[in-house]
Amino acid sequence: MTRRTAEVTMLEMAALKQFLIGVAVWLAAVAGAAPAFEHSRARPAAVVLAQDASPAETTAAREIANYLGAVTGANLAVLTEQASQSGASRVFVGPTVAAKRAGMDASGLGAEEWIVRTVGADLYIVGGRPRGTLYAAYHFLEDVVGVHWWTPWDESVPRRQSVRVSKLSLRGKPAFRYRDIYMLYGSDEGRFAARNRLNRQGDSPIHARYGGAMDYGPPYHVHTAYTYFPPKDYFAAHPEWYSLIDGKRTYENAQLCWTNPGLRDAFRAKLLETIRKSWADARAAGNEPPLVFSVSQNDCNGACQCEQCQALAKSEGSEAGPLLDFVNAMADAVRPERPEVFIETLAYSYTQTAPKTIRPRENVIIRLCDTESNMLAPITDPRSKAFREHIAAWSRIAKNVRIWDYAVTYNPPGMPLPTVHTYGPDLRYYLAHNVEGVFVEMEYEVLADMRDFKVWVLMKTMEEPSADIGKLTDTFMSGFYGPAGVWIKRYLRELEAEAARRKTVCRFWEGSPARLSYLTPEFVGRAQRIFAQAERAAAHDPDLARRVAHARLPLDRATLMLYPKLQSALPSLDRNAIAERALKVWLQEIDRRVPEGRRTEERYNAEGDIRRLTLAPAKVLLPAQFRGRPAGSVADYTAVMLRRWSNCLKVVSDPEAETGLTVRLDLTAPDVEHPERYVLPMPLGLYVPDEKRLLEAPSITAAAIPGPGYHWYKLGDFPIAPSTYVWFFWSWIVQAEIENAADAAGPSAQYEVWARVKFEGPRFPHAKPGQTDAICIERVIVARKG
């Protein structure tokens, strides 16, 4: 048997799984083994709804009726319990009297606990409130009937003459109390989230008819310090409420002064007012009131350096000390009035380390953010030791711990990223360490790598971390991609193997293709050939063809970004054809997935991205002064490979640039923050995140600029450690990931690091008439010495 035949057989078996379950129970019923629930044209069943059904239970009844009708072509009546009659099979939904008589008392079940059971010829769909019954309905439809909801827009519904079930008894509840993916982007009131048992979907609400959400109260779920006390309203009157940094009170890139007594009094009053109002608003709207409120640091560093804050930070061995002391005070204020409410804060960046003696109150939730782990390996990987230690430390002292995880990379987003094999091990590790909830950040509804597949598997494993990833993969590949699924599965398997073979490390902020060492010419060529086979397998079906093309988009964009390095080894690559294919599916998916109000901007960005990638010269020569070096000793990072952390940075054509392209910072653009700070001398340097080590480089001074146009500036000679990158400006908004320039066989080697930069406009020397102030960075060169 060939490998491909084996793959086909596995996926065909997975696709037949639900059908075979149905056949088995049907044969048992036909043989007279037991009475069976049956719904067919000949014997239509009825759905019986509890008399006091909640909106979510009403939805459960409707979904069962609709999908059993779609499967068999036979409609089901939906009746109240008082109106139902004995005779044909019935589906009792919710806390019915019949369910209680049969031993299924919904009042004793948890909020998301569910039961699916047959008793004689009747089927019972029962669960706790608010979501248990709804989850029971969806488990029955998915696990027994074989319905699957792949995305908010795509589903699979089997077709057969009847649905027959006997001796069925299923029961369960989600492993994690809180399960959240930011964002799903389905404008469906939370229907897709509920169908896959997700109880929050980022900023998009889940309507009560779909069970509602485990939502946060206002003002927001994270980074609320300045939302409660915006500097524009409070700094002038109360500078002492904000960080003291270098002897000066400031609100720029700063935090609140967590030990200030006046701030505590004001925050306590505003927090209680916020909780009271949000509860009143929820009850007026007929919704469940929020139970979690965030009191959390801003999304930056800038810890307060005042004597009181630093004394607490030093005694606790962590900047989490002052923050947690403040949060505990807020939790103490809330508890007498609302004992069911939790106050959540972050353990993030400089507050990740748990304090030595301060313990979170029982009504405090710690949301620990994973900013350190290698995304390409399970958390048990030795390279993720630091974050494991944070989990262990917080789980020892906190009753309630949540994880903030990242499932995408940034800058650029959407590169091929083998991560699905980590979901189960990571979630099982969290569960074993007192974690009660998981938040997964996963933006980029069009660009994120294999997003539909990854979201679906994430939802399944967040509900049940012990789920078999292999079986889930087979189910999705056959159900979503049809006959092309075997090829996409092969691509994913080879991508994972290549990353493991090369021991690639990637954190969420390190997504450039230059860093992803598995994107070699050999692998990219092989991957493109696999996708060509997948597209041929799906060519007969427009929906399947579109799904395959979308799955190929990350590979195509990576190919375009790396094209100057790939084309000599892969001369058959047609850059224009790849660009055309990528843009076509990108625009299709924007129209399909993106809300109408954002589509024009998204289409503009897509067209600009592809245009930028095809503007780069097909063959980029090394600068003349580096061409005589030994092969492989010089790494060249051109404009399209530089990491840009602000929308004000543009990759543009520039005839003065050796490569034809440059990263341009127009200092007159309205979206530049603090343009007045981009002056000479211009700071730049190297940083090693793994070691939290800054490598100094000489700033570019006016005297160092020999004339107009581009010039090479040497940063110095350095060893290149894993994770090293070059940064530019006080803001660090341009970066070049250069760790792949290092020779693993010679870790002590020294490297020259150079940058080619141009300064324009009247604030810089040698300005030409009519120029506006701008700084352009064309490329970075890293050359091994010796």
Image (cartoon, rainbow, N blue to C red):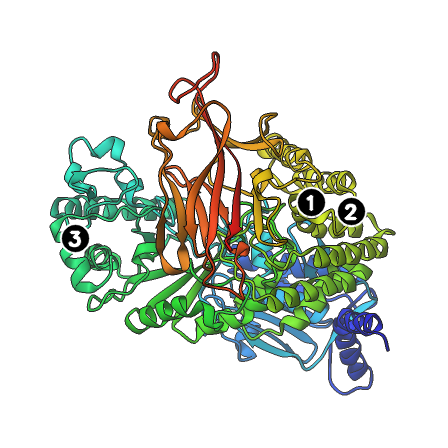
**Mark 2 neighbour density, 10 Å: few (under 14) some (14–19) many (20 or more):** some
Give the percent coordinates (x, y) of residue 555: 68, 51
**Mark 1 neighbour density, 10 Å: few (under 14) some (14–19) many (20 or more):** many
Vertical order, 512 against 118 (above or below)? above
Q: Decide which of tag 3 and tag 2 comes sooner along the chain.
A: 3
Name the residue that disc number 1 marks. Answer: 563
Residue 563 visible? The answer is: yes
**Rendered residue at 68%/80% (across/down):** 120
- Label of residue 573 in the image: 2
> Considering the numbered disc 3 on the image, is that residue within a helix, a strand or a loop?
helix
Q: Quadrant of the N terminus?
A: bottom right
Give the percent coordinates (x, y) of residue 739: 50, 55
Q: Hey, what amino acid is under mark 2?
A: Leu
Nearest the eye: 240 or 648 = 648
Q: Are marks 3 and 2 in contact (CB under 8 Å)?
A: no
> Considering the numbered disc 2 on the image, is that residue within a helix, a strand or a loop?
loop
Q: Hey, what amino acid is under mark 1?
A: Tyr
**Mark 3 neighbour density, 10 Å: few (under 14) some (14–19) many (20 or more):** many
**Rendered residue at 42%/43% (across/down):** 715
Side (left or right) of 333 relative to 781 = left
Q: Hey, what amino acid is under mark 3?
A: Cys
Q: Which of the 4 image quadrants contains residue 366?
A: bottom left
Name the residue that disc number 3 marks. Answer: 309
Give the percent coordinates (x, y) of residue 229: 25, 39
CA separation, marks 3 and 2? 58 Å
CA separation, marks 1 and 2? 9 Å
Nearest the eye: 479 or 78 = 479
Q: Decide which of tag 1 and tag 3 comes sooner along the chain.
A: 3
**Rendered residue at 48%/64% (across/down):** 747
Image depth: mark 1 or mark 3 in front:
1
Q: Which of the 4 image quadrants contains residue 530?
A: bottom right
Residue 46 visible? The answer is: no
